[in-house]
Every structure is written in C-alpha cells, then in structure tokens.
Image (spheres, rainbow, N blue to C red):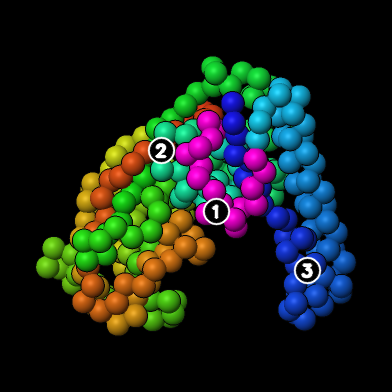
C-alpha cells in the first residue's frame, strides 16, 4: 500500500511565524490564548507522530504532504489518502482526488475541532487502521461547476456560496427567469447539508444522496430547493463563487452563467452516518 499523508500546520505554527505585528502582539500579551495555542500545537504534533509510527510499524510506504502543497502531487498515484487535521484539511484533500482513491480523516485535535468527516483520532487510529479492510465506506456525492459551459474549479464535497465579496452588499441573480436580491445563494451537498445550511435552519439531506440544496440567504421565510442541477445567471457586477469555505474561490461577473451538476462521488472511510446521528442528537 502507498499512502498520501496530508497534514496541516497548527495555529501556533502559523501565528508564531507571522510578520503581522498584531498577531505577534496577541501571542506575546495574551497568556491564556498563547497557552491554548501551544497545547493544541502539542496535541496535533502527537497525533501526526502516532499516525506515522503506525504506518511505519506496518511497513506502509507513505508520502508526507503539507496541506498547501497538495496540488504538486498526483493523488491518484496513491492507494489511500489520510488527512490529519480537521474538516478543512479533509476538504482540501478531497479537491485533489479525481479517481477512486479512498480518503480517511484523522482528527488531530478533537477537543477543538468538530471533524465531521474524520473517522478516528489519536486514541483509536491504530485499531482503525489495523482493521481497515472491514471499516465502513460511504460514497459521498460531489458537485461539478461550469462557468459559461466551461468546467471550473475542483469537485465540491461540502458547499458552494455565490455572493458578493463584500458581505454587506446585495447579491443579484436569476434562476429559471426568476430574479433574486439577497445575501447570496448557498448550495449544499448531502454531506455539506449538516454544515453551513444546517446552521441556517435547513434540514439535512441523506448523506449519500445525489441531490443538493439551494438556499436563498437573507430571505425571510425561505425554504430550501432540492435538485440535481441548476443554472444561475449572475446579475451582480462583481460576484464570487466560494467553494468549501474561503480557500478556493472564482469570480462570477455580470452576465456570466454558473451551472452546477451532480458530479463524481468520493469514497470516504468510516461510519460517517453514525457521526452525523450523534451530531444531530445534540440539537434535539
């Protein structure tokens, strides 16, 4: 087996090396926050050390890849992708999986991270990995995007937001000859429907569905629209498409057309349905 091991840097690593004076002052002056950052940094390093130790002990060949450099590698050359971090690291890796390569998420700091897509953590990774062949698997649908009929961006596992880059500005668009003016259009997959759209008050879809949800944000008494495809005509002079958070975005200007379709699924290891049920129980 050949494994791609994707990891993230802790907030402490990023902040302590920052050239921003405000960040440096924050770290130096706020002792309680500094201690929390250092503790999280230690936990995350211990998690990745344990994952590496387990792989080494099982004579597994692996390539350790920093999250921001994933694009330099062909993940289809690996038999398994393991992410060590949270959902952000998992989603980043999912953008680069184009073939049938399965992905396993390891939550590097479960006390501070939801890690919805993460099947295990430092405590149970070794046992999970040793029973890898019998672990549950899910095929989660992703979305494909097209601007003016040309494919754009990576496959989307969680959600897409079309909005103005200015959060205070109005977003204008048209769907099926109906015009809208609001805070933007949020599109969620089955997997992503337990994230942003859920916090907007929308009931989640089944995890493995090929349908996705449309939510007109900032619109009173709006209801989600469930579909397998949509064409959005931008009436916004400078609109932006945000994919799975804020790290990946594309412009969608006045007069351009965005088409979203059900796309290529991804194989995720772990009992994500059980994790979702536990997550939803907390809101009952």
Of callouts 1 and 2, which one flags the residue occurring earlier in the amino acid sequence? 1
Q: Give me the residue at 72% from left, 34% from top.
A: 51
Q: Which residue is mark 3?
A: 17
Left or right relative to 156: residue 235: left
Quarter residue 217 falls in = bottom left
In the rendered structure, are the residues bearing label 3 and label 2 in contact, judged by CB atoms less than 8 Å apart? no
Q: Is residue 24 above or below residue 278?
A: below
**Magenta span:** 63-80
Q: Residues within 10 Å of mark 3 (few under 14, many from 20)?
A: few
Q: Distance of mark 3 from mark 1, alpha carbons? A: 23 Å
Q: Give me the residue at 26% from left, 50% from top.
A: 261
In the rendered structure, are the residues bearing label 3 and label 1 in contact, judged by CB atoms less than 8 Å apart? no
Name the spot of residue 268 as percent of width and height, x first. 48, 34
Q: Which residue is mark 2?
A: 99
Mark 3 or 2: in front is 2
Quarter residue 25 falls in = bottom right
Name the spot of residue 210 as percent of width and height, x first. 29, 40
Q: Which residue is mark 1?
A: 72
Q: Secondary structure at mark 2?
A: loop
Look at the image and say whether residue 67 sits in the magenta stretch: yes
Q: Quadrant location of the N terminus? A: top right
In the rendered structure, are the residues bearing label 1 and label 2 in contact, judged by CB atoms less than 8 Å apart? no
Q: Distance of mark 1 from mark 2, alpha carbons? A: 16 Å
């Amino acid at each position: 087996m050949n494994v791609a091991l994707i990891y993230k840097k802790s907030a402490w690593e990023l902040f302590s090396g920052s050239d921003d004076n405000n960040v440096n002052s924050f770290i130096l002056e706020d002792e309680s926050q500094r201690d929390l950052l250092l503790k999280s940094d230690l936990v995350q390093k211990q998690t990745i050390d344990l994952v590496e130790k387990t792989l080494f002990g099982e004579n597994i060949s692996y390539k350790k890849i920093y999250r921001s450099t994933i694009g330099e590698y062909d993940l289809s050359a690996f038999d398994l992708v393991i992410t060590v971090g949270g959902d952000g690291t998992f989603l980043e890796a999912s953008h680069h999986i184009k073939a049938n390569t399965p992905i396993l998420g390891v939550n590097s700091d479960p006390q501070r991270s939801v890690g919805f897509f993460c099947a295990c953590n430092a405590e149970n990774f070794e046992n999970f990995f040793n029973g890898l062949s019998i672990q549950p698997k899910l095929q989660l649908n992703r979305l494909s995007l097209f601007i003016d009929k040309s494919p754009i961006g990576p496959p989307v596992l969680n959600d897409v937001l079309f909005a103005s880059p200015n959060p205070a500005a109005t977003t204008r668009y048209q769907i099926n000859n109906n015009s809208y003016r609001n805070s933007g259009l949020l599109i969620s997959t089955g997997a992503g429907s337990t994230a942003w759209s859920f916090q907007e008050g929308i009931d989640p879809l089944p995890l493995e569905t090929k349908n996705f949800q449309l939510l007109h944000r900032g619109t009173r008494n709006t209801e989600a629209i469930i579909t397998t495809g949509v064409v959005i005509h931008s009436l916004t002079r400078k609109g932006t498409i945000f994919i799975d958070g804020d790290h990946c975005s594309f412009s969608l200007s006045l007069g351009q057309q965005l088409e979203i379709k059900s796309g290529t699924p991804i194989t995720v290891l772990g009992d994500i349905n059980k994790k979702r049920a536990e997550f939803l129980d907390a809101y009952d």
